[in-house]
Amino acid sequence: MSQVHYLTTPLTDEDIMNLKAGDIVYLSGTIFTARDAAHKRLVDLIENKEELPFPLQGAVIYFVGPTPPKPGEPIGSAGPTTSYRMDSYSPTLIKYGLKGMIGKGKRNQAVKDACKEYKAVYFGATGGAGALLGKLIKEAEVIAYEELGPEAIRMLKVENFPVTVINDAYGNDLYEEGRKKYEVKD
Amino acid sequence: MREIAYEDIVKAVKNMVIHTATNLPEDALKKLKEAHEKEKSPVAKKVLEQLLENAEIARTEKRPLCQDTGLAVYFVKVGQDVHVTGGTLTDAINKGTEEGYIEGYLRASTCDCFTRANLKDVIGYNLPAVIHYDIVEGDKIEIEYAAKGGGSENVSRARVLAPAQGPQGVIDFVKEVISEAGPNPCPPIIVGVGIGGTFEKAAVASKYALFREAGKPHPDPEVAEFEKELLYELNKLGIGAMGMGGTETVLAVHVEKNPCHIASLPVSVNVQCHSSRHNHVTI
């Protein structure tokens, strides 16, 4: 049975080991946005042993490229983007302390293995629910790579941001299990 | 010859772009509500609930439905008795697109395909639009528009089958594409299938199929039957809303067919996510 958890970032190993694929998590605290181009830069920094624009230990990265905020609002619409484009970078970030990723869509085996080895999870958020999810972001500030536009790194403050555990630290995958349950074989 | 001013087209396109970003059309909304009622998986039902809530927030608070406000795709029927004054029709559609994306606070998503640099400072905001023209009788211009997101577009595929593979070959190919796509295109989805013509004709037909009112059967009963069969087959895959497992993966299948070469059977599958933002204006 899927459980409901309320967690605050940064996430600990204990938080991660309590999560199972299919669990619903309401996340609060600080999360960071990064998409393709920002991921490439973060991994380059790690390889060159340079300082990252935010602490990776216990961090959660949200794969999102929001719409521009309207005047008076912290952010526009902000639903998840498709995650597989980050697959080649995520294992390195997980190895250096990243605990959670929020996106939508399948991850490759290397990401799932890294989640298992270094205790991290992949969360799914509802794709296309940008208006709903954008409203749950209370503050947003560009902290790096402003020139990347929607792909810049932002620090977000969230309250009860709803996500579902897709890949847990035990090797389970909700996409595979959920589908098997409802598939109709001839 | 009827004259239509460039500025009038710019304005009509701009208003359509802004309105469409925040208002999920009635047909898509109806299909989502039906899916929500029918869904057997509690997890998927919850996702569908969020999507309905999202549509309501977008409409009432004028927030874009999705952060991916898409590339602008148009199918334009131009009456041959129309003359556009003060500029070209293509420029007017592009200008209206640009103004709509800026004034609506929509995301600029166009980039150079090699350098990946965002093009908003080079050639304008979210330009160029993708425009398909058709010359028709009359003195009006009908502009059909869709804001096409990247996640669903990325899983679209085209293949030229051998004629011997026939309709079953088409079904197998469509199933393969949607199965492989899984959660990535933001299900529940609408599936456009273009069959026949040439390689590129099939691709354009599969895109145009997505502009049809969601779930409205093809006027040819034989094609409509084929659409029903495909819908049934695809929903057996069990992918469900957001891929978390469920009975309602595909909201509708729309097929468009064209005559083709005796040696060929081109098939294209174009996928539309649940945020099926489309609209039209006649000038």
Image: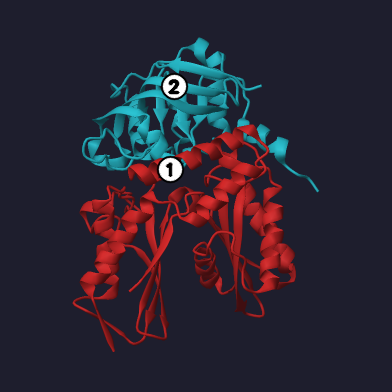
Q: Label 2 amino acid?
A: Leu
Q: How is the model colour-coded?
A: by chain
Circle 1: element type: helix
The part of the image, by quadrant, that contains residue A3 is top right
The colour of chain A is cyan
- Furthest toward the front, the residue is B60
Question: In the displayed structure, does residue B180 sit left or right of residue A80?
Answer: right
The colour of chain B is red
Mark yes or no: residue B201 visible.
yes
Depth check, front residue: B3 or B242:
B3
Q: Label 1 amino acid?
A: Glu
Percent x, y for residue A140?
Answer: 28, 29
Residue at 41%, 36% (x, y): give it. A132
Residue at 52%, 10% (x, y): give it. A14
Do badges 2 and 1 share one subunit? no
Circle 2: element type: strand
Pick the quarter of the image with the N terminus of chain A: top right
Residue at 71%, 36% (x, y): give it. A180
- Furthest toward the left, the residue is B86
Depth check, front residue: A21 or B165:
A21
- Residue with the mark numbered 1: B56
What is the tally of numbered marks visible in this picture? 2
The part of the image, by quadrant, that contains residue A134 is top left
- From what the image shows, is residue B166 above or below residue A149? below
- Residue with the mark numbered 2: A27
Between the C-alphas of marks 2 and 1, the distance is 23 Å
| Residues tagged 2 and 1 counted as in contact (Cβ below 8 A) | no
**Chain letter belonging to callout 2:** A
Percent x, y for residue A111?
Answer: 53, 29
